[in-house]
Image (cartoon, rainbow, N blue to C red):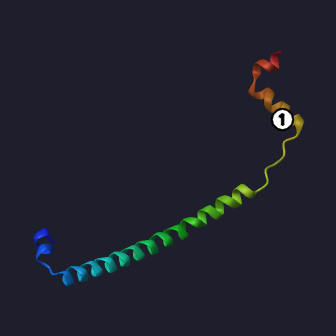
Amino acid sequence: MAKNDLDSLSIEELAALRENATDKLMEKVATRRAELEAELEKLSQYDKLAKKTQAAPLAKVKKSDEKKSDEARDPIAKAA
């Protein structure tokens, strides 16, 4: 809508236009919010899987295994 069109409208017409625009904006925001919430719900399933994976207990490393692992990583320490 051109600026000149707005200048030609009465106060009542402008107020009605504003109300209609506000209603339409609220509609679009509500629609977009619903879309985003649906997408978030889909993505949340992956978050639940990740939390389950993180919650799984890790195998404990024995001191003797830890020493062997350190020696395998540092061949100079092995020679000393």
Q: Image point 37% across, 79% down: which residue? A: 27
Residue 54 drawn above or below residue 13: above
Q: Image point 19% across, 81% down: which residue? A: 11
Type of amino acid under label 1: Glu
Q: Residues within 10 Å of mark 1 (few under 14, many from 20)?
A: few
Specify the quadrant of the image occupied by residue 55: bottom right
Nearest the eye: 36 or 76: 36
Q: Which residue is mark 1?
A: 66
Quadrant including the C terminus: top right
Q: Image point 33% across, 80% down: which residue? A: 23
Q: Image point 14% across, 79% down: which residue? A: 9
Q: Position of residue 20 (x, y in %)?
A: 28, 81
Quadrant including the N terminus: bottom left
Q: Left or right: 40 with respect to 16?
A: right
Q: Left or right: 15 with respect to 79?
A: left
Residue 68 drawn above or below residue 79: below
Residue 56 drawn above or below residue 35: above
Residue 34 drawn above or below residue 52: below
